[in-house]
Image (cartoon, rainbow, N blue to C red):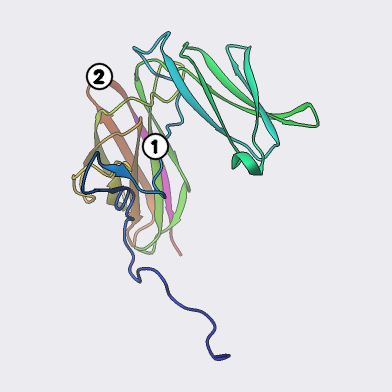
């Protein structure tokens, strides 16, 4: 009808951090507060639930395969369908036992591929990884550095919320910090941040000078860590 129209705009036209949780509930005239139809309960990618040993826990498994098998410590818990009718999801209820939980995709009766989660110990050290270890010395280029709090075996402690301190040296600046916790009201421009689910993020920007940018992350009772980013001149 209007061949000059190639599309329309149906959502907010601004760059913002999102609205997770907004509109998740509605308030009827009588009765309890209820979830809206589009709201979902949060699911955490974790098999570390201290204090829940022996208690029932609900496990959600999402799969591209027609069915999945679930194992805990190499013992088969069960097999369920995960096709279109199940919305590619299976729910298992089982008593929590520390160790390893493993989901295996099944097609034509055969196990195709798997993914596993392991129980982590209490956080002991900080591990750092950068999306890029070389950036341009143009005053604009960025490196996103992920902070992990791990146990002595290198497993991320998903319950760690330690306060982290950041120190930077060389031709770089910390331009933002975050942890994905929507309830955290701390500033995004700071030299510290609480971890959330064992993680945090530091965004470093180059200056106009070439050289080595060194980021040091520390926290009381944790072994600190340092990562170097090379700022390369044009």
The reply to whether the C-beta atoms of the residues labelled 1 and 2 are less than 8 Å apart is: no
Q: Which residues are magenta?
A: 225-231
Picture coordinates of residue 204 (x, y %)? 34, 50
Q: Give the image location of residue 67, x and y in percent.
A: 69, 31
**Residue in front for this viewpoint, 86 or 44:** 86
Q: Secondary structure at mark 1?
A: loop
- Residue 221: which disc? 2
Q: Residues within 10 Å of mark 2 (few under 14, many from 20)?
A: few
Name the residue tied to disc 1. 42
Q: Secondary structure at mark 2?
A: loop
Q: Residue furthest right?
A: 108
- Badge 1, how many Cα within 10 Å: few under 14, some, many 20+? few
Q: In x, y percent, where is residue 191?
A: 21, 43
Q: Position of residue 3 (x, y in %)?
A: 58, 90
Q: Residue at x 61, y 39 (%)?
A: 86
CA separation in Å, label 1 and label 2: 30 Å
Please say whether residue 219 is one of the residues in the magenta stretch.
Answer: no
> Majority secondary structure of the magenta segment?
strand
Q: Point out the image quarter for the N terminus.
A: bottom right
Residue 164 or residue 170, whichever sits in front: 164
Earlier in the chain: of badge 1 and badge 2, it is 1
Kindly identify the residue that appears in the image at 40 percent across and 15 percent down.
Answer: 121
Depth check: 55 or 27 in front?
A: 27
Q: Quadrant of residue 163?
A: top left
């Amino acid at each position: 009808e209007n061949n000059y129209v190639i599309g329309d705009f149906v959502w907010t036209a601004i760059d913002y951090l999102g609205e997770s949780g907004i509109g998740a509930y509605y308030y009827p005239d009588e009765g309890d507060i209820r979830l809206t139809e589009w709201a979902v309960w949060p699911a955490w990618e974790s098999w570390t639930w201290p204090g829940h040993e022996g208690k029932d826990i609900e496990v959600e498994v999402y799969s591209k395969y027609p069915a999945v098998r679930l194992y805990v410590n190499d013992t088969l818990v069960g097999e369920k369908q995960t096709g279109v009718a199940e919305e590619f999801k299976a729910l298992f209820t089982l008593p929590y036992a520390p160790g390893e939980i493993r989901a295996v995709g099944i097609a034509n009766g055969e196990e195709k591929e798997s993914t596993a989660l392991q129980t982590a110990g209490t956080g002991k050290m900080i591990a750092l990884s950068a999306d890029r270890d070389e950036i341009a010395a143009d005053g604009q280029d960025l490196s996103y550095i992920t902070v992990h709090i791990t146990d002595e075996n290198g497993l991320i402690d998903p319950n760690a919320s330690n306060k982290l301190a950041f120190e930077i040296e060389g031709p770089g600046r910390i331009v933002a910090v975050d942890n994905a916790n929507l309830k955290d009201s701390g500033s995004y421009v700071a030299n510290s941040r609480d971890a959330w689910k064992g993680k945090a993020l530091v965004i470093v920007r180059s200056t106009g000078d070439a050289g080595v940018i060194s980021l040091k992350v520390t926290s009381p009772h944790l072994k600190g860590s340092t990562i170097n980013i090379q700022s390369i001149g044009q």
